Amino acid sequence: MFALVDCDQFFVSCERVFDPKLKGIPVGVLSNNDGCVVARSPEIKAIGVKMGDPYFKIKALLKKHKAVVFSSNYELYGNMSARVMNILQTFSNDVEIYSVDEAFIRLSKYFKYSDTSKEISTTIEKWTGIPVKVGVAETKTLCKVAAELVKMRQIKNKYYILTDPVQIEEDLRSFDVSEIWGIGRKTTEKLYSIGIRTAGELCKYPEDVIKKRFGINLLRTTLELKGTQCFSIETVPQPKQSMRFSRSFGKPAIEYNEMHESVVYFATSIAANLRKANMLASAVSAFITTNYFNKDDLQYSNSFTVSLKEQSNSTNDIVSAAITCLDTIFREGYRYKKSGVLLIGLVDQKMSQGNLFTSQNIKNDQISATMDEINRKFGRGAIKLAGEGIATQEWKMQRGKLSHNYTNDWDDLLKVK
DNA sequence: TCTGGGGTCCTAGGACCC
DNA sequence: TCTGGGGTCCTAGGACCC
């Protein structure tokens, strides 16, 4: 039997521990650089603040309701998290720290689950000031459902035990698939479209069809809902497989020099983090992408990876590899493999106004121009030749609108050899 | 004007081999 | 018109989580 222990609005609760006056009033916590809302008290939810709402858009609303928002303080949250997890270790030898504010623990069969659950939630709240909810069940996915039900039904005791098959069936019948752990936006849409709206309906759907149409993950999730354990508890933290340092820029026009400066800084930080974790990198990647909130703009993204000759965590090696990535991104275009179309980006100084070229069905051997000639004509580094061919159409951003013209300039280059 | 950041896993398709 | 079959490995893209 497992229990999921989940802190209520963790970041908000942490702030409230150190300022009890915040109790009962709308409180939120903002992301890095105060970009958007990442944690909300029930009171701030009630006035209409959504998860991920950009701060600048809700400022007036916050003022009107005398809501308080905080910049995030990850050191504080990490600290509080450690305290909560330490307490959990006293209840079980098998604790999986699933995230900063959640843990799965294995419950001994000799426990009375209701007593233990109650004790966990009261002990943590008493010792740390953080309110938690507890969901008990035979699989992790059902634990998640149980904890969610505590929230949805505002259960006073702060725990819910989902072990009785009849009870499980009844609860799942009205449990929306979008609330299931492991089912996100895309899968929800797909399930809705074939008439599956609740966990109960999902459980009745043939397993082989689930596997075929949605993949192994949804099958595992479904089996877990039916009581078959597919996800085990990982009490030993696995070493990280990747580390990332990424930031959004405050303004859309990013010039090479600015990018270069940022990449040096990011790569330096990552190298330091690697050394701190006593780890070595075998590859370094960099990526860029345009602002996807500007829906009318032509979008562009690109990335490049350098494999290191020898694994390393030295600032020198990591930074120089990252710069190689950046330079390559700026020099080359982006190959859009899936559609069989070559998409070539000429990275403008204003990223949101990059020029893109597309091509179809032109083989390399139909091209009479050499790479040098192309470079001379269109600017060095503007395009990349690949198996599929080169561009014949030009897409351009003109005064914020997307337009495309066939460009005759290509004709000379495309004489059949 | 201002819209987070850091992770994991799975899969389809391509390249390559015999 | 027909165009082997089976296997591995790698990677980009997609989906999900907190």
Image: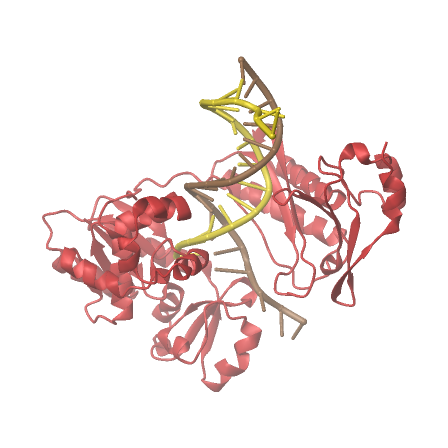
Chain colours: A red, B brown, C yellow
Along the line of sight, the residue nearer the viewer: A89 or A35 = A35
Residue A5 locus on image (x, y percent)? 27, 57
Front residue of A355/A111: it is: A355
Left or right of A209 in this view: A411: right
Q: Position of residue A248 (x, y in %)?
A: 61, 58
Look at the picture and state if A75 lies above or below A266.
below
Relative placement, left or right, of C2 versus A401 is left
Extreme bottom residue here? A64
Location of the C terminus of chain A (image quadrant): top right
Left or right of A368? Residue A252 is left
Q: Nearer the viewer, residue A5 or A333?
A: A333
Q: Position of residue A413 (x, y in %)?
A: 87, 40
Residue A210 visible from this viewpoint: yes
Q: Residue at x 23, y 51 (%)?
A: A226
- Dividing the picture into quadrants, the one containing residue A177 is bottom left
Front one among A225 and A339: A339
Viewed as shown, does residue A67 lie left or right of A143?
A: right
Query: Which residue: 39% across, 79% down?
Result: A46
Q: Is residue A392 above or below residue A241?
A: below
* Picture mark count: 0
x then y, percent, for residue A269:
58, 46
Q: Residue A316 lies in what quarter of the image?
A: top right
Res A312 visible: no
